[in-house]
Amino acid sequence: MDSIKKSNSLEEQLISLVKAQTEFTSKALMILSLGVKNIYSKEEAALFLNLDPDYLYQLKFHNKIKAYKKKGQKKSISKKKI
């Protein structure tokens, strides 16, 4: 019984280590790509500006910053009344 608990504990630790390693690798790759890109995703921009992605969204929502669409993405056009 004790050996089963130990093996379960080791398995949980391995799972958490693999998850942490995956997160670290994806973040490192994102940091390396920041100097190459002209337009960033929300997560990349937040990492570049050292801000929370939700706060960055709020800035965009309140028109404090401008967001750009990639070429080929649908753009929303507001029609002004004349």
Image (cartoon, rainbow, N blue to C red):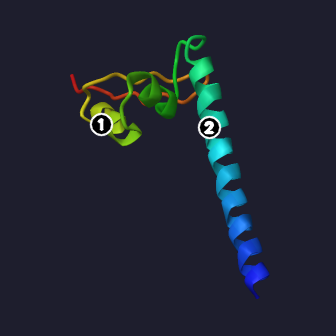
Residue 81 found in image quarter: top left
Residue 8 found in image quarter: bottom right
Mark 1 is surrounded, within 10 Å at the Cα level, by few (under 14), some (14 to 19) or many (20 or more) other residues, namely: few
In the rendered image, the vertical position of residue 17 relative to residue 41, given as above or below:
below
Q: Where is residue 53 in the image (x, y as percent from the top left)?
A: 40, 38
Query: Which circle marks residue 24 in the picture?
Result: 2
Q: What residue type is labelled 2?
A: Phe
Any part of residue 71 in sight:
no
User: Looking at the image, which residue is at 53% across and 12% down?
Assistant: 38
Q: What residue type is labelled 1?
A: Phe
Mark 2 is surrounded, within 10 Å at the Cα level, by few (under 14), some (14 to 19) or many (20 or more) other residues, namely: few
Q: Is mark 1 on a helix, strand or loop?
A: helix
Residue at numbered disc 1:
61
Residue 38 shown left or right of residue 18 in the figure? left
The residues tagged by marks 2 and 1 sit, at their Cα atoms, a distance apart of 29 Å
Residue 60 found in image quarter: top left
Marks 2/1 in contact by CB < 8 Å: the verdict is no
In the rendered image, the vertical position of residue 2 relative to residue 24, given as above or below:
below
User: In the image shown, does 44 or 19 lie closer to the viewer?
Assistant: 19
Q: Position of residue 19 (x, y in %)?
A: 66, 51
Mark 2 or mark 1, whichever is nearer to me: 2
In the rendered image, the vertical position of residue 28 relative to residue 17, given as above or below:
above
The disc, 2 or 1, on the residue closer to the chain's N-terminal end is 2
Residue 35 shown left or right of residue 47 in the figure? right
Q: In which quarter of the image is the N terminus?
A: bottom right
Q: Position of residue 68 (x, y in %)?
A: 45, 21
User: In the image shown, does 35 or 38 lie closer to the viewer?
Assistant: 35
